[in-house]
């Protein structure tokens, strides 16, 4: 009787401890995975902001603004003194 109790105690205890160890490992894995996910989201947001800052990602309103700015700058170039002949730039003939 004592032998069967001891064997059952060892078997049930080992399964219980195995479950506890696996639960701790799984909890730690989930925590690390969520932290990595947060880092990835933060890095993506930083990259998106850098793209916007350096002009690689342009929204439609910014594209319209840039095209209107280029039209204004071309109008300013046309209104300069016409003393240079066609094909001559600031540094001479092209």
Image (tube, rainbow, N blue to C red):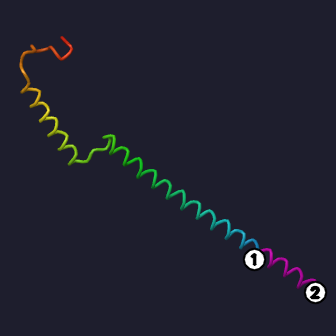
Residue drawn 49% across and 58% down? Answer: 38
Q: Which residues are magenta?
A: 1-15
Around disc 1, counting alpha carbons within 10 Å, would you say few (fewer than 14), some (14 to 19), or many (20 or more)? few
Most frequent secondary structure within the magenta stretch: helix
Is the residue under label 1 in contact with that under label 2 (CB below 8 Å)? Answer: no
Work out whether 45 lies above or below 28.
Answer: above
Q: For marks 2 and 1, give the CA distance.
A: 21 Å
Residue 6 sits inside the magenta stretch: yes
Q: Residue furthest right?
A: 2
Work out whether 15 lies above or below 76.
Answer: below
Q: Which mark is residue 16?
A: 1
Residue drawn 17% across and 16% down? Answer: 89
Around disc 2, counting alpha carbons within 10 Å, would you say few (fewer than 14), some (14 to 19), or many (20 or more)? few
Across the whole image, how many numbered discs are drawn on residues?
Answer: 2
User: Left or right: where does residue 94 sit relative to residue 25?
Assistant: left
Residue closer to the observer: 46 or 21: 46
Q: Residue furthest bottom?
A: 1
Quadrant where the N terminus lies?
bottom right
Q: Residue furthest top?
A: 93
User: Secondary structure under badge 2?
Assistant: helix
Residue drawn 50% across and 55% down? Answer: 39
Residue closer to the observer: 27 or 52: 52
Quadrant where the C terminus lies?
top left
User: Left or right: where does residue 93 sit relative to residue 43?
Assistant: left
Instruction: Give the residue pinned by disc 2.
Output: 2
User: Secondary structure under badge 1?
Assistant: helix
Q: Earlier in the sequence, mark 2 or mark 1?
A: 2
């Amino acid at each position: 009787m004592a032998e069967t109790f001891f064997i059952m105690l060892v078997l049930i205890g080992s399964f219980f401890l195995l479950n506890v160890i696996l639960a701790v490992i799984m909890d730690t894995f989930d925590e690390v995975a969520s932290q990595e996910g947060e880092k990835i989201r933060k890095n993506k947001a930083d990259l998106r902001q850098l793209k916007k800052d350096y002009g690689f990602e342009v929204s439609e309103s910014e594209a319209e603004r840039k095209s209107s700015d280029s039209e204004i700058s071309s109008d300013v170039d046309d209104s300069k003194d016409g003393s240079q002949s066609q094909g001559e730039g600031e540094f001479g003939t092209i």
